[in-house]
Image (cartoon, grey):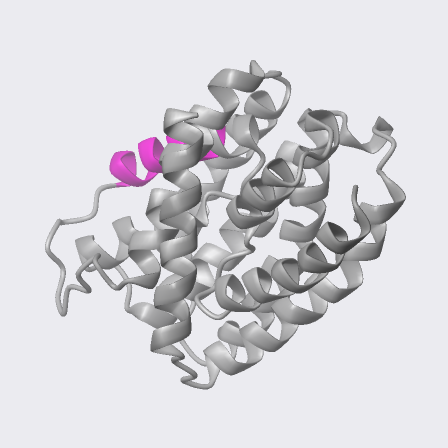
Amino acid sequence: MIEYAFYILLFLMPVAAFFYASVGHGGASSYLMLLTLFNFAPEQIRPTALMLNIVVSFIAFASYRRTCEFKKDIFIPLVIFSIPAAYIGGTILVDAYLYKKILGVLLIFPALRFLNVFPVAEETVLNRKWWMISIIGLSIGFVSGLIGIGGGIILSPILLMAGWANVKETAALSALFIFLNSISGFIGSNAIDVTIDPQLWMLMPLTIGGGALGAYFGANKFNPKVLKQLLAAVLIIASVKFLIG
C-alpha cells in the first residue's frame, strides 16, 4: 500500500471503531468497507475484520452491561441458532463480485442506524415468540459468517423497532451477539491459518483503542450527532460504490 494511503487508514479505522462501539457494535462492516476500498487482499480482509470485531464488541458489551438490564430471554434463543449458522456461513467462500454487492447492501443498515432512521418503540409493537427470535438468529448468523461481520447492524434495528429492548439494552445484546458470532465465523472460515499482512497488524491496536473509547463514551450518553451523520454519509457513498461498481 502507498504510504500516505496507509496513514489515512490509520486514522479512519479507529474513528470507525469509535462510532460503531458507541452504539454497541463491533464495526466489522466498516472495517470490511475500508480494507476493500484500500485494496487489501480479499482473503485477509474477512479474518482481520472478525478479529477486530471480537475485541471491540466485547469491550462494548463490558461498557454497556453495567448500564442496563441484560435480557437473557431474548439473547439465549438468538445465539443458540446464530452461532452454528455463523460457523456454516464462515465455511463458504463468496465470489468477490457477489461479496461486494452483499456488503454494499449491508452498509445501508449502519448508515440508517447512525441517522436514527429506525424508530425506537416505547412499548412492544410485536409480541415476541421463541420461533421469531430463533429465525432471526439463524438468518443473521448465517449472513454474519458469510460476509465476516457479527450481525449487530441487522439485529439492532429489529430489536428497537419491535420494542423488545430499549437503546442501551439493544446495545448490550447486540455487542455480545456480535462477539459470539464473530468467534464462530472466524473458526468456520479457518481464518487462523491465514497469513495477515504486517500493515494490518499495525492497524489493530489503534482500531481497538478507538473502539474502547467509543464504548466508554457511548455507554455514558455521548451522542456526537453531526459526526455520526458524516459517518453515515461515508457508509452510503461506499454502499453505492459497491453496488454499482
Q: Is residue 5 above or below residue 103?
A: below
Q: Is residue 116 above or below residue 213?
A: above
- Across and down, in percent, residue 196 comes to 84, 37
Q: Is residue 245 above or below residue 63?
A: above
Q: Is residue 76 left or right of residue 60?
A: left
Magenta segment main secondary structure: helix
- Across and down, in percent, residue 204 comes to 77, 56
Identify which residue, 177 or 4, lies in the foreground. 4
Image quadrant occupied by the N terminus = top right
Q: Residue at x 83, y 29 (%)?
A: 194
- Across and down, in percent, residue 72 comes to 42, 58
Q: Is residue 61 left or right of residue 119?
A: right
Image quadrant occupied by the C terminus = top left
Q: Is residue 18 above or below residue 72?
A: below
- Across and down, in percent, residue 100 comes to 49, 27
Q: Residue at x 38, y 80 (%)?
A: 223
Q: Residue at x 71, y 70 (%)?
A: 209
Q: Residue at x 50, y 61 (%)?
A: 20
Magenta range is 130-142
Q: Is residue 175 magenta?
A: no
Identify which residue, 140 or 197, lies in the foreground. 197
Identify which residue, 41 or 182, lies in the foreground. 41
